[in-house]
């Protein structure tokens, strides 16, 4: 009996010792990185840390320029911690804007300014942008160039150049676009300009809320030799609305009054044509993937008959990103004047001008 009892006690002791060995004494915890002051830091819900630059946060989407992954857009709900190395401008849902070093952690937002901390619920956050005027993150730009050269019986040169510059703050968006298209052919030393057109547009948007914005300044300068337009200047304002704005799709519409003055290259009417304008437009950008974007921008102006009656501009196409800063763009353009004005002693120009262009773009 004593032997049986001793065996039972030995077996129980063995089982107890084995179970203790199976229980881990140390649980591994991912280390917190040493926050280098050269970078902004971001922690994902998965526990991964990224270093780089905070570009902006709008509509619950954070744009972050990662040192390793380049420019990425993240759902705000996937970010659990955020630390900035520069001052940031923070806009809250009640319209207040505050500035300071930013820390987002555990559902709270901390702003450090002048040696003091301010704490806010994260639910009150509306947008984030850099507060330093010389930060690259405030500006975005792109330059495109497309050239086609033909030689032989007919020498022909075609080129398209475009520039886009944009700046965003918590309250505003400023943008400038310029497009120039030129085509010339030479036959037996006789030169003929086939296309010579340019368009400069600039606008300033002020955001009233997440959806509604005022286009407080809207300007366009347009020239088109084939349409007999020496210059056409339009200035006005409009009300804008974000129909859809999420990670893949951004769709805006605008409507408002403008004033237009048109000077023709050659016409029997020597005076410039002036007209009131009702301008409306829609702009859409859809991200098929991280490398392919689709763009659609259509602007329509209702003017007096001597100024064209209805003037329209369409730009649509695809942008194919093949490196960090370079893209290949396939673009289709339509410029329409419903009631063209003919040069003196010449036939009336056609209403529609179409262009299909392939160009190389550089983002900065």
Image (cartoon, rainbow, N blue to C red):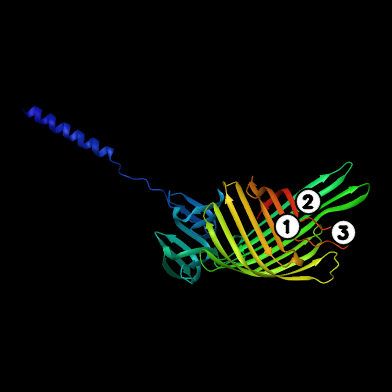
Task: Decide: is 360 above or below 214.
Answer: above
Within-10-Å neighbours for mark 1: few <14, some 14–19, many 20+: some
Tell me if residue 181 can be seen.
yes
The answer for how far apart the CA atoms under marks 3 and 2 are is 27 Å
Residue 325 appears left or right of 66: right
Task: Decide: is 104 above or below 160.
Answer: below
The disc, 1 or 2, on the residue closer to the chain's N-terminal end is 2
Q: Of helix, strand and loop, which one carries label 2?
A: strand
Mark 1 against mark 2, which lies toward the viewer?
Answer: 1
The disc, 3 or 2, on the residue closer to the chain's N-terminal end is 2
Badge 3 is on which residue?
Answer: 346
Residue 139 percent coordinates (x, y): 62, 61
The answer for how far apart the CA atoms under marks 1 and 2 are is 21 Å
Q: Which mark is residue 159?
A: 2
Q: Nearer the viewer, residue 316 or 124?
A: 316
Q: Of helix, strand and loop, which one carries label 3?
A: loop
Q: Nearer the viewer, residue 278 or 3?
A: 278
Q: Are marks 1 and 2 in contact (CB under 8 Å)?
A: no
Q: Residue at x 86, y 67 (%)?
A: 268
Q: Quadrant of residue 6?
A: top left
């Amino acid at each position: 009996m004593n032997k049986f009892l001793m065996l039972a006690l030995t077996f129980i002791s063995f089982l107890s010792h084995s179970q203790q060995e199976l229980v881990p004494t140390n649980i591994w915890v991912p280390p917190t990185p040493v926050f280098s002051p050269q970078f902004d830091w971001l922690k994902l819900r998965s526990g991964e840390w990224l270093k780089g630059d905070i570009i902006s946060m709008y509509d619950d989407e954070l744009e972050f320029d990662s040192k390793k992954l380049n420019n990425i857009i993240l759902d705000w709900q996937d970010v659990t911690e955020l630390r900035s190395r520069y001052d940031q401008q923070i806009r809250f849902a009640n319209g207040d804007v505050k500035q300071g070093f930013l820390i987002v952690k555990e559902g709270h937002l901390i702003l450090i300014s002048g040696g003091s901390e301010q704490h806010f619920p994260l639910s009150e956050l509306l947008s984030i942008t850099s507060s330093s005027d010389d930060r690259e993150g405030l500006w975005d730009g792109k330059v495109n160039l497309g050239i086609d050269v033909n030689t032989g019986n007919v020498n022909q040169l075609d080129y398209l150049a475009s520039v886009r510059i944009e700046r965003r703050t918590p309250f505003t968006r400023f943008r400038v676009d310029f497009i120039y298209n030129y085509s010339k052919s030479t036959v037996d030393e006789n030169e003929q300009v086939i296309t010579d057109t340019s368009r400069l547009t600039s606008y300033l948007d002020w955001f009233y809320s997440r959806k509604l914005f005022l286009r407080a300044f809207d300007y366009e300068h347009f020239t088109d030799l084939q349409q007999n337009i020496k210059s056409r200047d339009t200035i006005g304002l409009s009300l804008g609305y974000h129909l859809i704005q999420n990670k893949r799709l951004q769709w805006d519409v605008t409507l408002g009054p403008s004033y237009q003055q048109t000077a023709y290259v050659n016409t029997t009417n020597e005076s410039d044509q002036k007209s009131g304008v009702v301008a409306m437009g829609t702009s859409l950008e859809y991200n098929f993937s991280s490398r392919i974007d689709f763009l659609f921008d259509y602007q329509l102006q209702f003017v007096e008959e001597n100024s064209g009656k209805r003037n329209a501009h369409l730009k649509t196409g695809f942008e194919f990103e093949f490196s960090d800063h370079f893209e290949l763009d396939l673009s289709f353009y339509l410029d329409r004047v419903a009631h063209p004005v003919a040069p003196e002693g010449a036939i009336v120009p056609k209403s529609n001008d179409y262009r299909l262009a392939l160009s190389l773009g550089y983002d900065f």
